[in-house]
Image (cartoon, rainbow, N blue to C red):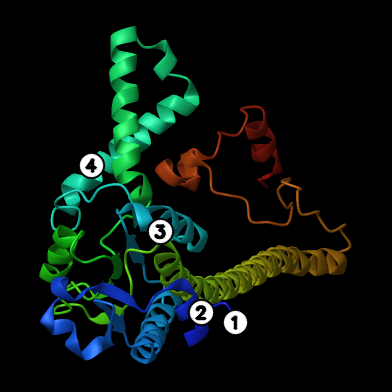
Amino acid sequence: MADTDVGIRELLEAGVHFGHQTRRWNPKMRRFIWGERGGIYIIDLLQTERLLRNAQEFVNDLSARGGTVLFVGTKKQARDSVKEVAEACGMPHINHRWLGGLLTNFQTINQRIKRLHDLERYESDGQLALLPTRERLSAEADLAKLRANLGGVKNMTRTPDAIFVVDLKTEVIGVREAQRLRIPLIGLVDTNCDPDGVDFVIPGNDDAIRSCDLITRALGNSIAEGAGQWRAAEEARIAREQEAAAARAAEDAARREAEEAQRRQAAAEAKAAEEAAQAAKVTPNAERDEVAGRPAPTAGDTTPDPASKIETPVADAVLGPEDAAPAAPAEAAPEADAAQPE
C-alpha cells in the first residue's frame, strides 16, 4: 500500500473511530456517526475513508499547481506531528498559538516576519553578541517569541491557498479568518464540533495522538507527491527556457557575425572600387604619353605636363600682348636702316 493510501485497518488501529461522549456531541455531526457504545459515539469509518481520499486528491492537485497548504494544530496531541509533517513537505505551519489577524491582517504580520528574519541574520552574523547587555537580552527575548509564534510561517510570503485544521473548536479564530477570506478549509472534525463552513470534512478523533498523526501524515504525503510533480515541471520549464535563451543567443551571435562579414565585404568592395577608379584616371594619360614618346607619369607625380597649354601671364591679361611686349634694343635700328635700299 502506498504512503498516501489509508484504509479502514489503519484508521481502526489509530483509534480514529472514537468520538466524544454522547452528552457532549453536536447534532450537526449526526450524519457521520455510526452508533454509540458505552456512552461514546462511534464514527463511521467508511465515510472517513472516502472523505479523507477526497481531501487527499484536493491537496495533491493544489500542490501540483504550486499551491500552499497551511497546517494548523496548536493542541498538544497534534503539535509535534503538525510541525514534522509540514516541514517534511515544505509547507508552513502553526503549532504554538494562532495570532489574531494572521490571515486578515497579513501585512502587519509580514512586518513581524521581516523582523524575525533580521534578528536571525544578526544572530548568525554575531551582531547580537556585540550589543549592550540590556539590548541583547531584549533582542534575544523578542527572537524567541517570534520563533515560537511565527517560526512556522516565516517563509510564507502570501496567504495560503488552503488550510488544514486539527480541532475546529480550538482553532476557532483561524477558522473564522479563513472563512472570511474564503480560503478552502480541511478539518479533522470530532463529534463535538460544527462541520458547517468546512469545505473538506474528515470525521475522526482529534484527541488521540495516533489519530492526529495518521490523518496529518496522509495529507502530508499527498502534498509532498504533488509538490514533487510541480518541482519537476518547474525544473523542466526552466531547462526549456534556458535552452530557448541559449538558442536565441546563438542566433543573435550568428546574425551579428553575418552582418559584420557583410560590412567587411562591403568595405573591401568599396575600397577596390576606389582603387580601380584612381587607376582608370591614370591610364588615359599614360596611353597618350606613350604615343608622344614620353614616359607616363606616375599617380603621385605632380610635375606639370610640358605639352600642356601655357597659361597667359598677368601682364598680357591687363595690358594686352602688344603693350606688354618689351621694346627692341636701340642697336638693332641702324641695321634695319642699312637693310633698306636707296
Helix or strand or loop: what does disc 1 sit on?
Answer: loop
From the image, state whether disc 2 or disc 4 is nearer to you.
Answer: 2
- Which is nearer the N-term, disc 3 or disc 2? 2
Identified by mark 1, the residue type is Ala
Answer with mark 2 or mark 1, whichever residue precedes in sequence: 1
Q: Which residue is mark 3?
A: 82
Label disc, if present, on residue 225 of the rendered structure: none
Q: Is residue 201 left or right of residue 315?
A: left
Against 223, residue 307 (above or below) is above
Mark whose residue sits in front, 1 or 4: 1
Residue 7 seen anywhere in this rendered image of the structure: no
Q: Residue at x 20, y 53 (%)?
A: 102
**Residue under numbered circle 2:** 10
Q: Position of residue 53 (x, y in %)?
A: 41, 86
The N terminus: image quadrant: bottom right
The foreground one among 110 and 100 is: 100
Circles 2 and 1 in contact, beta carbons < 8 Å: no
- Towards the viewer: 195 or 159: 195
Nearer the camera: disc 4 or disc 3? 3
Marks 2 and 1 sit apart, C-alpha to C-alpha, by 13 Å
Alpha carbons under labels 3 and 1: distance apart: 21 Å
Residue 253 is at least partly visible in this image: yes
Q: Mark 1 or 4 closer to N-term?
A: 1
Residue type at mark 2: give it. Answer: Glu
Q: Which residue is mark 1?
A: 2
Q: Is residue 38 above or below residue 119?
A: below
Q: Residue furthest front?
A: 38
- For label 4, the SS is helix
Would you say the residues marked 3 and 2 are in contact, meaning their CB atoms lie under 8 Å apart? no
Location of mark 4 (residue): 111
How far apart are labels 1 and 4 at the CA level? 41 Å
SS at circle 3: helix
